[in-house]
Amino acid sequence: MDLDVLYGIDVPRPWHGAHPYGRRAAEQRTYREAVWGALPDGVWWKVRLADRMGFRTAWAVERHFREGRSHCPAPEVLLGHLAGLTERIRLGFGVTLTPFGFTPPQRIAEKAATVDVLSGGRVEWGTGRSAPMEQTAFGVDRERSREDWAEALGIVTGTWREEYFEYASERFRFPRRMVTPKPVQDPHPPAWMAATSPGSAEVAGAAGLGLLSFSIMQPLEAVARQVAAYRAAARAPRPLTDVTTYRVGAYTLVHATAPGRPADPRVWSSVAWWYENLARFTLEWELPHLAPGERDRAFPLLAPILGGDVPVREFDEGDMILIGDAETIVTKARRYADLGVDQADVDPGRAAAAAGEVGGVPHTADVTRREAVRDLFARAPRLLGGPVGGVVDIVGAARYAALAELDDAGWDRHFDLVLRHAWFAVQYGGAAVAAAGGGTPVFVASVSGLTAAPLHAAYGAAKAALVSLVRSAAVEMGPRGVRVNAVAPGVVWTPRVAALLGPGGRERNAANAPLGRVAETADIASALYFLASPPASYVTGQTLVVDGGVGVKFPYPTIGDAD
């Protein structure tokens, strides 16, 4: 699970000083602290530190007229500034208010694309409808705001897709114009939807959008139901944009203490103040259109908070807020991962970095979804400048769990990520290679699919099925000039494996291998290259084991061992 930071630019009262100078000073101070941190030496602290520490995204909200709460009406300005101060962290619009009336869709396209260009392709594009307070001030038709939101998404992505764009409907008209600039990410940045009202999670899933959820004023069980509804709807989406995003982000409050030390009492009083003020604002401006029953179902803890009873300790014990030292926060955060928060690993930043290493073209997709893989291979000839002559597929990840403790979600995740995506890759990648006159898809299997290892039951079973799929594909596609093979690595020394095995892990595995070392990534790449190259033109349906000889060792104690 990735960790993000979100900036609302809260400027709480009281503002010390006569109007307008007190508020001006407070707003200026809050913006400086959000970007630079409250340090006397002016170090680029907060966002720069998050960038260096590996946080995935810095989100900036778009809020209007939120006195004392959020004084951030122009996230594109803040994010454009952060683009020049950071290197890796992604920059999220959290969110652009999208219905007609707030901002014309062509302006949204221009602003988001400009930040994408300035940041080198690091934008996450969140979308939302806002609440009645803002809608009425901008003349937004609240009854048709969801229709307008959906229509605007199509217009924005159309301006990014087409060289010249024009549009006419009952609700919006735009003459033929070239909208500039185009975003760096192809075809455009990942798209998200904020979900607070009942049924919104299902809308996001069905639209192929990432879900921006909230754990404030609702127990995690309610969040779990929301995530489950999103996942169910996302199984057969009708995407509103050209990029399918299958991720869940959950917003909550976090406060870190020194190791082993309890939080200062002021932290708890601050949380209580924050919740009570949010509850009053939410009731007055965001939920007046909901009947009491709908309101209570959406935010079951709203009523007691309005009564002055803010159960911050219950929030803490229920992991609705994350307060404690680093170990405590990580433990609590794991509950969010278990709910499915940020379960899919779709990271355009990593894609860009990998493409940069090999001179390739980055593209991100959730490969467990059929339409995403289909679209990938449909776009590949244009992205690569020619037909697809081969495919090297290295998708896969293991989450270790004892077989007796493995749940349905864990089992399904392994088979979706390891096997389901390979099925799609064989169908669409194999067809692309055949259309190019022949070639070869090569997959990365694993020795876990050939032998048994503790805590690898689901991963190993999925990899074993992948080996079988390779054989079947080779037989069926051979007549079309398509060879299908796989490489099964053993222990490969990567940063993730190093962190998993800990100190001494490299030496232990090197001692276990007849060749006396562990594999490097180049060893696996060489095997993949061989199977994809002309010297292997008569090899198909095979799985080449690259484990340094570990798998051929005699597994029982020998006479020599007794000495």
Image (tube, grey):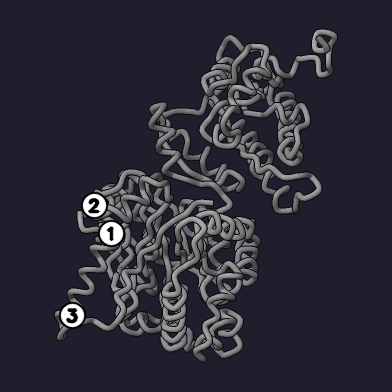
Q: Residue at x 30, y 68 (%)?
A: 104
Residue for point 38% across, 31% down: 356
Q: Name the residue under label 2.
A: 43
Q: For this rendering, which residue is in front, 352 or 237? A: 352
| Vertical arrangement, residue 130 with respect to residue 5, above or below | below
**Residue that label 1 marks:** 37
Per the rendering, the mark at residue 22 is: 3
SS of the residue under disc 1:
loop
User: What residue type is disc 3 on?
Assistant: Gly
Please, what is the three-letter code of the amino acid marked with disc 1?
Answer: Gly
Give amino acid for label 2.
Val
Under circle 3, the secondary element is helix
Q: Nearer the viewer, residue 400 or 298?
A: 400
Q: Are marks 2 and 1 in contact (CB under 8 Å)?
A: yes
Residue 484 appears in the rendering: no
Q: Which of marks 2 and 3 is nearer the N terminus?
A: 3
